[in-house]
Image (cartoon, helix red, strand yellow):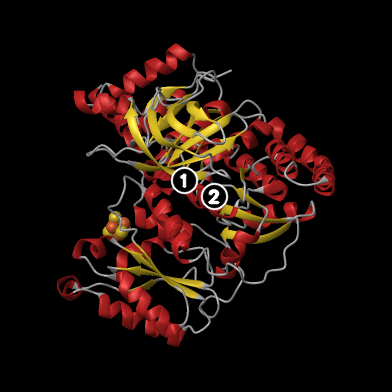
Amino acid sequence: MAALTREETQALIEEVLEVYPEKAKKDRAKHLMVNDKELESSKKCITSNRKSLPGVMTMRGCAYAGSKGVVWGPIKDMISISHGPIGCGQYARGGRRNYYVGTTGVDTFCEMNFTSDFQEKDIVFGGDKKLAKLIGEIEMLFPLNKGISIQSECPIGLIGDDIEAVAKKTAAEIGKPVVPVRCEGFRGVSQSLGHHIANDSVRDWILSNRDNQPFEKTPYDVAILGDYNIGGDAWSSRILLEEMGLRVVAQWSGDGTLAEMENTPNVKLNLLHCYRSMNYISRHMEEKYGIPWLEYNFFGPTKIAESLRAIAAHFDEHIKEGAERVIEKYTAPMNEIIAKFKPRLQGKKVMLYVGGLRPRHVIGAYEDLGMEVIGTGYEFAHNDDYDRTIKDMGDATLIFDDATGHELDEFVKVMKPDLIGSGIKEKYVFHKMGFPFRQMHSWDYSGPYHGYDGFAVFAKDMDLTLNNPCWKMIKAPWDKQEAEAEKKAA
Amino acid sequence: MANIMIRKSDKGYVFYLPKRDIEDSITSMEFDTPEKWGGEIKLGNGGVYFIEPQAAPARLPYSVRARRVDGVE
Ligand code: SF4
C-alpha cells in the first residue's frame, strides 16, 4: 500500500507546483510523476537530464565532480590533478569515502589534493607551463605513482589551454600514462556528463594499453565496474563473487589500480553496479572486445540472491553451484538479521533522493526489512534510469527528477516519511524538521552496505536512526517562532 | 548523421545514441537478412532512423552511422 492514493499524489504534485511562476511550473511539472508499474517506458511521464531551472536550489554537481570525484579519483595508484583554481579539488577530496589499501602519499593517493592552484596570471598567460612543471614535481616527489590524470576545471576550457599537448609531452618524459580529461564543470547539465567524459578518456588513453600482452586468463574472470568502495562496499561484494568461484580481475574504480583497469579487456563478463556512471565503458568493451555486461544489485538478500544467480547464468555448472552454495550459506544469518530488525522497522515509510544507482537499487533492501519506499528521485539520472525505476517502485508512489529544495520540503511535509535518505545538503534541514535521516551517498560515515555483510550494517543503521528517541523532541526552529508569535499576538 | 550503436538483448535489437545517452528498443528494421541489413529503423519512443542498407555485421554490438528521419529524440 502506498502512502497516498494516485489522486492524492497527483494533487500533491499540483500543490507543490503552485508557487512557481507559469513558465517554471510548466518546466518542473515534467520532472515529477506518479508511478505506474504498467508503463514500459518513462519518456512520456518524466523528463530528465535537462538543465536545472535558474533560481531554484538543486543538489547537482558539475562535470568535473563526476569525473574527478567519481570515476578517476578512486583509482588509488594514479594521481588526479585538479587543474585550475584550488577550491574545486579541495572540496571534492575524499568526500565520498572511497576506501583503499595502501600508504597514502607513498603508493596510493586518493585522499590527497593535487592542484595547479591557478592564480590570475595563469588565467592571463595560460597554465600549460605550470602544468608541465607540476607533473615533473609529482614524478619527483611521488615516484610510485602509476600514472597521472589531468582533471580540467572550468577555467581550462575557457582560456583554451592545450592540456593534450602537455599530456603527450610529459607522458613521454616520465614514461607513464598522462591522461588529459576535458571535464570542465560547465559541460553538461550535471555530474552525469562528467562520468561520460571520464569513461571516454579511459577508453582513449587507458583501456587498450595492454592489448596483445600476455595475460593468464581463466574461464571465470570478471570485473566489478561502478563500485566505488564507499565504506568498503566493493570488498563485501568481491568476497561473494570469489566465494562462488569467480576471479575478480579488476575493481573500477574503488580500491582499483591502473593495472587492473588495463587488464579488464581480458575478462569474460563485466559486472556493472552503478549503471549511470560506467555503462559507457561497458558498452565500448562489449563492442570492441566482445565482453558482455550485466547490471547487478547487491543491496539486501533478495536482490543479492537474484543477482548471484543472474551472474552465475553466464557461467558453467561449477559457478552455478557456487552461487547456490553462497546463497545457502548466508540464508540463515540473514534470516536472523531480518528476524531481529524487521519487527522494529516493519511498515515504516522511506523517501529517497540520491544519485546514480541508489534511488532504485536500495528499494529491495528496505523491502527485505518490511519497509516501503514511497518516494524516490535522482539528481542526475537519464531516462533509461527511470525506465528501470518504474518497475522497482510501487504503484502510485512519487518519482521526482532533479528535485528542488522547495519540492523536497513540501513532499516530506505531506507524505511524512518515517525515514529520509539523501545527502549532506539535505540532512540538516530534515533533522531540524524532526525527521530521521540517513545520508545515502556516504552511508553517513558507516558502511559497507553492499553484499550480505553490508546488509547487516544497513539493517542496524536504519534501526538506530529510525528508532532513536531524539526525533520526537525536535521542533523546527521556524515552527517554534510561529508558535511564540501566536502566543504574543494572543 | 549520428553515430549509433546497435546491440542485441533478449527482446531484440536495442538502439543506443552515445552522444545523447538515449537507449531504446528497435521495434522494426526494414532489412534484416545476412546480405541486406539496415534501412529504416523504428524505435520504441516513435523515433525513426535510417541506416544505409549493408551486409549484416558479423558481431553485435555494432556502431554505425545513421540519419534521423523523424520523431522525438
Ligand atoms: S563548476 Fe567549475 S568551478 Fe565549479 S567546482 Fe566544477 S569545475 Fe570547479
The answer to whether residue A469 is above or below residue A205 is above
Image coords of residue A61 (percent x, y):
36, 50
Q: Looking at the picture, how far across and down is residue A304, in whole percent? A: 70, 41
Q: Give above or below for A45 relative to B6.
A: above
Q: Measuring 43% from the left and 43% from the top, which residue is drawn there?
A: B64
Q: Is residue A21 left or right of residue A51?
A: left
Most extreme residue toward the top is A7
- In the rendered structure, the answer to whether residue A205 lies left or right of residue A163 reads right
Say above or below: B45 vs A185.
above
Crowding near pointer 1: few (<14 within 10 Å), some, many (20+)? some
**Front residue (pair B54, A301):** B54
Q: Which residue is mark 2?
A: A287
The numbered mark at residue B63 is: 1
Mark 2 — on which chain does it sit? Answer: A
Q: Chain of mark 1?
A: B
Q: Are marks 2 and 1 in contact (CB under 8 Å)?
A: yes
In this rendering, does residue A478 appear at all? no
Q: Quadrant of the C terminus of chain B?
A: top left
Q: CA distance from mark 2 to mark 1?
A: 8 Å
Q: Position of residue A155 (x, y in %)?
A: 23, 63
State the image quarter where residue A239 is shown: bottom right
Quarter of the picture containing the N terminus of chain B is top left
Q: Amino acid at mark 2?
A: Glu
Ligand 1 sits in quadrant: bottom left
